Image (tube, grey):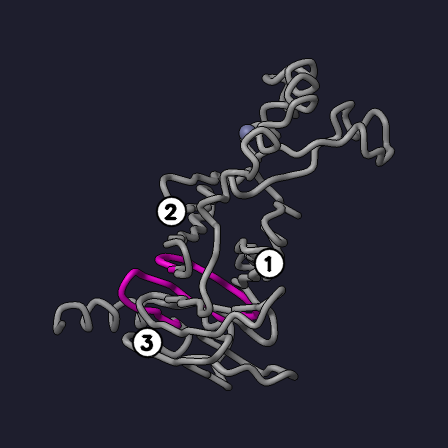
Amino acid sequence: MPLYEYEHMEGWAKVRRHVADEITLLCDQHHREKTSGLLPLEAVRVANASPFNLQEGASKPYTLHFSGEEALVTVGGNRFSCADQGYGTVMVPLSVDGIPLIGLVVADGHLLLNVVVFNEFNEPVLHIKNNQLYYSTSPWDIQLVGTKLTIREWRSKILIELQFSPPNEIHVLRGRLLCNGVEVLIRPTHVLVTNNSSLISGCSAINCHGGLIIGHHSRPMSGFFGMESVPRYLGDRSAALEFEREHARNG
Ligand SMILES: [Zn+2]
C-alpha cells in the first residue's frame, strides 16, 4: 500500500514509549489486524526483521513514482499543470480557506499525498500527511487497484478516488469534501459546489500550483478556478443536485 501507519509492536497502550526498534510501518489493513489481534505480534516481528519494502527497493507507491519536468493534475476533468521546481514542489488540487484538502508534494521522484477530510460537523476525520495515515477517527477502507487509490468511509459515504498515471499525471476522479460549511463534490467529468450550485467543468490552467481555490487565502494561490465568497452551511443541497442532473440531461 502507498499509505502507511506507525505501529508500536509491543502495543502502545502497554509500553507508552516511542523506541525506534519497537516501531514498524504497516499498511492500514495490517495495522487494524494487528490491533484487533488477528495478526500475531510474532508475524509482525518476523516481517519487521526483513521488511518487504527494503527487499523490493521501493514500496508499492512505485505506482506513485513521479518523473518529468511538469506535472498535470486534473480535478473532475478540470486541469492544471505546473513545473517541477525541484524537491518539495507542492500542488493543491482543492483548497478551502487556506486549508489544502488535497495536496501533492513531489519529493525524491515520488508523489506524497496529503488529504484532510472533515465531516458535517467540521471535525477532521481523516488526515493523510505525506502518505502517512496520520489521524483517523474510524477505520477507512483504502484500496489500491492498479494505479487507482480509493479511500472510503462507509458510514458517512465519504469517498475520495485518485488515479495516478505515471510518470507525471494525477487525476482526482471523485470526492466529497467538506470544510467550513462548503461542500465540494468531485465527479469524473466536473466539480459541483453545492452551496451556490456552481458546476465547474472544462477549465484549464497552466503554470499554476492550485486547482479549485475557495474562500480567503492569506497567501494568494492561483488555480484553474477561484471562488472568493461562497455562502456557507446551507444544508439543503437538493437544488444543486437538481441543477447538476439538468446539466447532465442537456449535455
Ligand atoms: Zn500490509
Residue toward you, 167 or 61: 167
- Earlier residue among tags 2 and 3: 2
Give the CA distance from mark 3 to mark 1.
30 Å
Task: Give the magenta range.
Answer: 171-193
Q: Please give the name of the residue rendered at 58% of the width and 68% of the height, measured from the top-left corner.
A: 89
Left or right: residue 53 versus residue 198 is: right
Indicate the quadrant where residue 38 lies.
top right
Residue 36: x %, y % from top left: 63, 22
Pointer 3 residue: 200
Mark 2: amino acid: Lys
Residue at mark 1 to residue at mark 2: CA–CA distance:
20 Å
Q: In terms of depth relative to the viewer, which is nearer, 94 or 24? A: 24
- Label tally: 3
Residue, disc 2 = 148
Q: Check disc 3 and report its element: helix, strand or loop.
A: strand
Q: Does label 1 or label 2 sit earlier along the sequence?
A: 1
Crowding at mark 1 (Cα within 10 Å: few <14, some 14-19, many 20+): some
Ligand 1 is found in the corner quadrant, namely: top right
**Residue 161 location in percent, x, y?**
40, 52
Name which residue type carries label 1.
Answer: Ala
Residue beneath disc 1? 107
Residue type beneath disc 3: Ile
Q: Is residue 140 magenta?
A: no
Q: Secondary structure at mark 1?
A: strand
> Residue 16: where, in percent of width, then height?
86, 32
Q: Label 2, label 3: how many angstroms apart (C-alpha)? A: 23 Å
Counting other residues with Cα less than 10 Å from the Cα at mark 2, is it few (<14), some (14-19), or many (20 or more)? some
14 horizontally vs 164: left or right? right
Along the viewing direction, whichever of 140 and 231 lies nearer the viewer: 140
Tag 1 near tag 2, CB within 8 Å: no
Q: Is residue 191 magenta?
A: yes
| Location of residue 63 in the rendering, given as x and y in whole percent from the top left corner | 44, 46
